[in-house]
Image: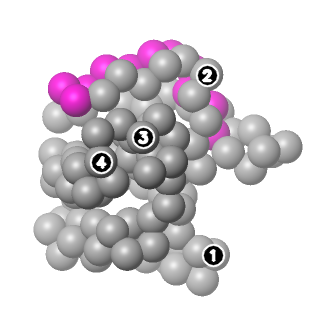
Amino acid sequence: MLPEVSAKYCEQSDKFVLLGALATPEVHLPEGMFSDGFSSPWYLRWYVNRVEQGWIAAWVHDRCYQQAINTKSWADKLFYKNLRRCRVKKSKAKIMYLAVKLFGKGSY
């Protein structure tokens, strides 16, 4: 299991800010980091809400994209791995992985 995320919503930026540093086996998340959570378009939020089970996977993925940690492919695969660590159903995790693989953009 991965640690729980403690964050607050910032209306001005429409993002969440991390209230304390977190560490996963692969990536360190610093206090004060911003994330939009799961980046699903409004019309798909019935399937993937911005905040739900496996939320830390979104934070780690955002950190990788923001800092160009390793490669995009590695970050996307880590996203899937973290979703499964958080017990997100395999079918849903696969769909979310394919979405970031095909449409994710970062600092790469």
Residue at 38% over, 46% down? 61
Q: Is residue 20 magenta?
A: yes
Identify which amino acid the numbered label 3 is placed on.
Ala
Residue 59 visible in image: no
List x then y, in percent, for residue 8: 64, 33
Residue position marked by numbered label 4 in the rendering = 71
Q: Earlier in the sequence, mark 3 or mark 2?
A: 2
List x then y, in percent, for residue 82: 23, 46
Q: CA distance from mark 2 to mark 4?
A: 24 Å
Residue at 45% over, 64% down? 104
Q: CA distance from mark 1 to mark 4?
A: 28 Å
Residue position marked by numbered label 1 in the rendering = 42
List x then y, in percent, for residue 84: 16, 54
Helix, strand, or loop for circle 3?
Answer: loop
Q: Which mark is residue 32?
A: 2
Dot in front, 1 or 2: 2
**Farthest residue, direction front:** 108
Q: Earlier in the sequence, mark 3 or mark 1?
A: 1
Classify residue 77 as left or right of residue 47: left
Residue 14 visible in image: yes
Q: Earlier in the sequence, mark 2 or mark 4?
A: 2
Query: As displayed, is residue 47 above or below residue 81?
Result: below
User: 10 Å neighbourhood of mark 1: few (<14), some, or many (≥20)?
Assistant: few
List x then y, in percent, for residue 41: 59, 74
Q: Earlier in the sequence, mark 1 or mark 2?
A: 2
Q: CA distance from mark 1 to mark 2?
A: 25 Å
Quadrant of the image occupied by residue 25: top left
Q: Which mark is residue 68?
A: 3
Q: Is residue 35 magenta?
A: no
